[in-house]
Structure formats: structure tokens, C-alpha cells
Amino acid sequence: MPGVRRLQLPAGVQDLLPAEAAAKRRLEEMLLRLFSSWGYREVVTPTFEFIEALDVGPAASSEELLYKFIDREGHILALRPDLTTPIARLTATKLRHSSFPLRLCYAANVFRYEAPQAGRMREFHQAGVELIGADGSRADAEVIALAVEALQEAGLVDFRIGIGQVAITKAVLAELELQPEAEMAVKEALVGKDLVRLTGLLAQYSVPPAASRRVEGLFGLHGGEEVLERATGLLAGTPAARYLRELEEVFIALKALGLQRYLFIDLGILRAFDYYTGIVFEGYVPGLGFPVCGGGRYDELLEQFGFPCPATGFALGIERLLMARDKAGVAFPPSVPGYLVAGPSPASLLREARRLRQQGAVVELDAQGWSREEAEKQARERGLNLIWVDD
Amino acid sequence: MPGVRRLQLPAGVQDLLPAEAAAKRRLEEMLLRLFSSWGYREVVTPTFEFIEALDVGPAASSEELLYKFIDREGHILALRPDLTTPIARLTATKLRHSSFPLRLCYAANVFRYEAPQAGRMREFHQAGVELIGADGSRADAEVIALAVEALQEAGLVDFRIGIGQVAITKAVLAELELQPEAEMAVKEALVGKDLVRLTGLLAQYSVPPAASRRVEGLFGLHGGEEVLERATGLLAGTPAARYLRELEEVFIALKALGLQRYLFIDLGILRAFDYYTGIVFEGYVPGLGFPVCGGGRYDELLEQFGFPCPATGFALGIERLLMARDKAGVAFPPSVPGYLVAGPSPASLLREARRLRQQGAVVELDAQGWSREEAEKQARERGLNLIWVDD
């Protein structure tokens, strides 16, 4: 008997059997075709890189997510936890003489060393876009409009995209003048949407009541256009006010595109990756406890690779989209008719199979030399039409 | 300035820029469509597994090829060096109640810790098929016929597939009754096609002259149908004779399919992976110093996962096929027309873009609010047709 670890998979990774693999392939092809029609061109980056190229965020916590290993030259390598950072490196090193804005996209697997749970695997697949070299609300609106079309393309109807602005949170936190660990703790409470912990921390660090109210007030702000008004009140006269105006501009641009019914504003959206600097967003479907897509503006990431340049983008979670499709009862169209071609003469079989394949059919050849009775049984078992070639 | 390891890639891995990524994507889609039309269904396996599941061969040398790392539970994990072994595990554990023969395929990346050189990267891409649960010459002929179609589908004309039979080599080596290290050394010389070393080793281990002549004679045997006759002479009366008859049967079946002009026989083909047990083959194109595809029969691999079952299959090297296409001057058809849609009103731009995309065009939106003059310049730079929307 083979040992148990020969037959099992490590926690958090999975096999995709034919039906699941086919759904994934079709969804990725549909999304890449959509991205391509918007002018985004696919790139491929290595599965692993030097840790120095992947661990570029200021947050120490991100390194814990990495699968790390040491090569025989003693360098630390890591499996990529996302594609945004590798594409920033690629752009800074190999595409810096392109025409900007540059539109790039991908469909690839990523790796995060997290506790596996529903909707969160340690290896999973993303499809996404990066719009590099464009600042301003038109660019933010473009990627959000494209995210809406991507979710529609994925067959979803009942979805919403929440839009936030991390620059507001960052400015409001900076005002509190906390020590680094204290700021990190507050940020974690915000990212984790843990209001009880947040209130406790603000008290513990003796944050003045007015500032505390501002942080807590922003944290809970989500809804339609009216949220912008209430935030304007909360932020009046603070440095964060101008970041709120950016958010307003993007919202107005998307409203002009007729997309308002898919959108809401949520100033509590922070995104776990620390490279975001401005407008951020996440897509939700009812009944799934995690976003199906997320992204935003990251104007300081390319600078980490020696090429200062504004950028924005988003990624869709392929497994999550497939779960959302299943939940919503969306099916891919049935596949083409299938045949089993069998009979005594292999050469005649191949000719007949070729003819059928040219008409778009899926054709299995009998590889065993079955009798007619056996071939009939096998065709039935597989749901195939038997073509018996007798000559 | 960012450190040098932030900007560089580890040896043996690479970025694919848009033109290369597009060629790879199109080739993989074409191959998967072909495999699907033959009844092969795609599966996806994890990028890494427990080392016990990947290192199943009897050859100690294969473990050196693995990228290994240790997870936080202390298990040794490794990046997959091929898909045949993971698909054997998947079949044995999750598809053993299917109708056999079972046809599975894949397009995926694999990892081998080898010295990088032309045509040999440490991370590279393969597309391939596995025909599981079928023994006999029809099955061997099916996968070789499919390999011919795959190379044609890839746009190649001037290619040849060499067919060998490792069971002959194994039987002839067994007859020599060498010690394990000696047999390993002889095998390495055979795999490395190092005739000088082979002759030296046979002398060193005092192999009798008749047996030495048999090993050396088989080693050099390659050519057309006449090779079968000469091998029959060399192997007459030895246990290897019946494996030669299997090879003959497959060759005759493929000849009946009209594929003879693509084929030759080469008893020196051994393949590096130690799981092969019978008919093996490799595809070559002129001017490339390495095969573009390879595969064969591996009747003992599934048993390693507790499910004894004959099987055969092959993998194509995607990067190698793309190099062969380039060398042969094969180009993908030009892509669809591209437009840059610009103008003062984002909502009007999106409407116009949507109209053009529905007609199959690639459309970039102006994300910057360019003036008409700037938009004209940008469209020229990118080779796009400018659509200026004025309302």
C-alpha cells in the first residue's frame, strides 16, 4: 500500500476534475477575451521569484503569507501571492519604454499561506487587469466599468461593487499620530472590520474623542450617493477632504456610464495588500461570504522597482466566480455531440473520426479492439453515440 | 535604488511579454481544442504536492530535479516536475470508478532544477494527454497519431517522430546481471547517448562480448522499417524479442494510418523519466537540438498509487514548439483591428467602444482626457485607428 502522503494533497490545494477544469478554462477564456477587447494584453510571469521582488510592501504581515524556499545558491525564493507586484516589476524592467498608459492582463495561479476555508485556498486562480501610467478618475472609472462587464460576462446578474478610498483612511490615521505598532493594530482592526476591537484600541491609545468619532464614523459609512455627503461633513477641513473629492469624481463618472445600480460606496474597504493608495473596490454576490473581485489604485508600487508611475487594476477570483455561478444556477452551454468510433480496422476508424471532428464533434476512438456488443455497452456508459465502422 | 534581486529573475525562469504570451495562449488553446476533439478532457492538479506523491520513480536521480520546500507543519513539498505522475495519482484516488480507458489532458507549467540552456528552462509549459486503462498497440498508435496531429496543429510540417521501446533496453540490461550502481551508470550512458562512455563501462564491468555487442548494436539502431529486421536478428532467442514484436505492431498500425512519412524507429530513445515501461517516442524538428514532444507507455506508474492500470501518453513542450514555429517562419494570423476611442465625454466613449467591441474590435478607451491632437499622436504610436467622439 502506498503511504498516505502519496495519496493525499497538502492542505489548501486541490485537483480540478474534468467538469471543474472545463468550467475554469471557459471562464478564463471569456474573461481574457473581454480584457483583450478593451485593449489589455496578457503577460505571464514566473511562478516563483526572489523574495525581494515579491515582498515589497511596508507591511511585515504580508511576508507571512508567502510560501518561501531556498535555492541551491542560497537565495530565498517565494511563490507569487498575486500578479500585481510581478507585473509592476515586469513593467519597470522590461516595458518602461512602452506607450503609456499600458494595459496588461493575466489569468494565473497565486499562492497564499493562509488557513484554508470556504472560498480561500492556498493555491487559487485569478484573472485581472493592470492599467499602468494613468492617474485620475477616468482610469479608476475604466477599471471599475470593466469589472462590472467582467462580472456580467461571468454570467452574474445580482452583484454589487463597493467603492472605497484608502487615501482617506491613511490621512485620518496619520492625523492620530500613533506609534507604528499602534497604527498597525488599528489598521488590522479596520481591515478585519472589527468595530469592537477598533473602539477598544482607540480608547487604549487615548485618541481624542473627535478623532475617534471620525475614524469610527468613516468605518461604518456605506451606502449610496448620500454617503458622500455625510463623509463630506465628517472630513470638512481635514487633509482627507481632497481624497473624498476623488472618490466623488469616480462615482459621478460611473453614474454617467449608467452603472449606478451596481455600485455602492463603502469607506470601510481597505484591501489586505498594502500597496493600495487611492480608490479601491470589491465585488460581492449575495450569499457568498467573500468578495469575488477586488482592486484599486496603487500609485507607489512601481516606484519600488525604480519606475515611479501611477497605476490601477483589479483581480477576479476564478474559483469564487465559479462558486457564485453555481449558486446562481448559471450553466455553460452544453458541449458538442460525442461519438465513439469502433470497429475492426484502425485505419478506417481514424478516417471516420477525422471526418466527424472536422464537423466539430468530439470523437473517442476505440483503443482496445472491442467487439460490437462491447462497443455498444461502452458507448452507453459514456453517453456517446456509437459509430461502428465495419469495412 | 531597488536592490538587484528586486529587479532580476532567478536563473531559468522568465517573463512572457504580450506577443510571447499571446502566442503561448493561442497554441495552448489550439492543442486543448484538438485533444478535446479526440475525447481527452482537461484536468488541473496543484502546483506543489507532498514529495511522496511526486518522487515515485525508482531512480534516485529524479529527486535532484525537484524544487523542494518545507511547510510549517514540517512536511516536504515539491513543485511538480511533470503532469503524468500527478494525473496518475488523481486517477487512482478520484477517478478509479470511471469508464476506462479514460482520456485526460492538460496545459500547465512544470519545474525542473536543471542547468538552464537553450530549450531548457527551470519553469516551462507543457500540453499533453494521458490515455489510461488501455494496453496494446491500438492505444500506443492512438497517442502517436495524436502527437502527429498536434505537431501539425502547431503549424509544423517538417517534423519526425522517433519510436523506441524501453522494454527492450530493460530486458537486455537485465540479462547483463549488473550490480545496481553499474546498471545505473550504463543506463545513464544510454539516456545521455554517450557511446564512448557506454563502451568503456561495458568493458569495465566485464560484460561478455556477445552481450556488449547486443547493447551497442541496439543503441545505434535507428531508421525506417528495416531497423525492425536488424533488431530481430540481434534479439533472436532473447526475452526482449517479444517487446520488439510490440514495437512492430505499433509501427504497422501507424503505417496503415498513412503516417509512415513522419516516423522512424530509434531503439536508443529511453526518456529521462523512469516510469516508462514500453513504447516510447519523441518528436523532432530540424535545427532544434532537443525534442519538441515526448511520451510513451507507463504501465507500472498507477500501481504506485494503489491502482494497477496500464497507461500511455505524451507531452508537448510549449516553449519549444514556439521556437520551432519561429524557426519555420510560421506566424499566427494577424489580430483584429484596434481602435483608440477618445473625446471629452467618458459616457459617449464607452457607448462607442461597446458598439465596436460587439463587432469584434479591440478598443482602448482614452483614460487620460487627451486633447484631439494628443489622441492622434497616441493612436499613431500604438498603431490604432482613432475614433474621436465629439458629443
Image (tube, coloured by chain):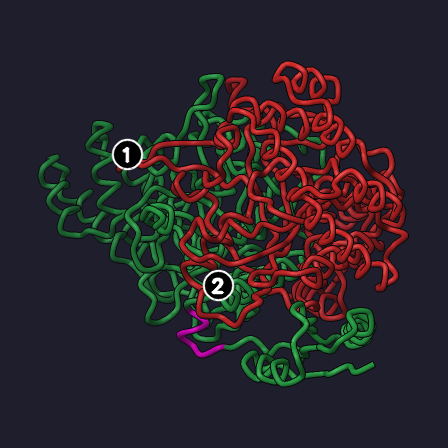
Chain colours: A green, B red
Residue drawn at (21%, 37%) of the image: A185
Circle 1 sits in a helix, a strand or a loop, which is it? loop
Residue B42 is situated, as x and y percent measured from the top left of the image, at 58, 61
The stretch in magenta equals A324-330
**Looking at the rendering, in which quadrant would you find the C terminus of chain A?**
bottom right
Confirm whether circles 2 and 1 share one chain. Answer: no
Whole-percent x, y for residue A335 in the image: 62, 76
Q: Residues within 10 Å of mark 1 (few under 14, many from 20)?
A: few
Q: Position of residue A21 (x, y in %)?
A: 52, 62
Dividing the picture into quadrants, the one containing residue B319 is top right
Measure the C-alpha gap from mark 2 to mark 1.
28 Å
- Amino acid type, mark 2: Leu
The mark total stands at 2
For disc 2, the marked residue is A17
Give the image quarter of residue A135: top right
Q: Nearer the viewer, residue B389 or A300?
A: A300
Secondary structure found at label 2: loop
> What secondary structure is the stretch in magenta mostly built from?
helix
Does the stretch in magenta take in A326?
yes
Q: Is residue B165 above or below residue B11?
A: below
Please tell me which residue is depicted at 56% across the width and 29% down the height of the picture. B177
Disc number for residue B74: 1
Q: Disc 1 residue type?
A: Gly
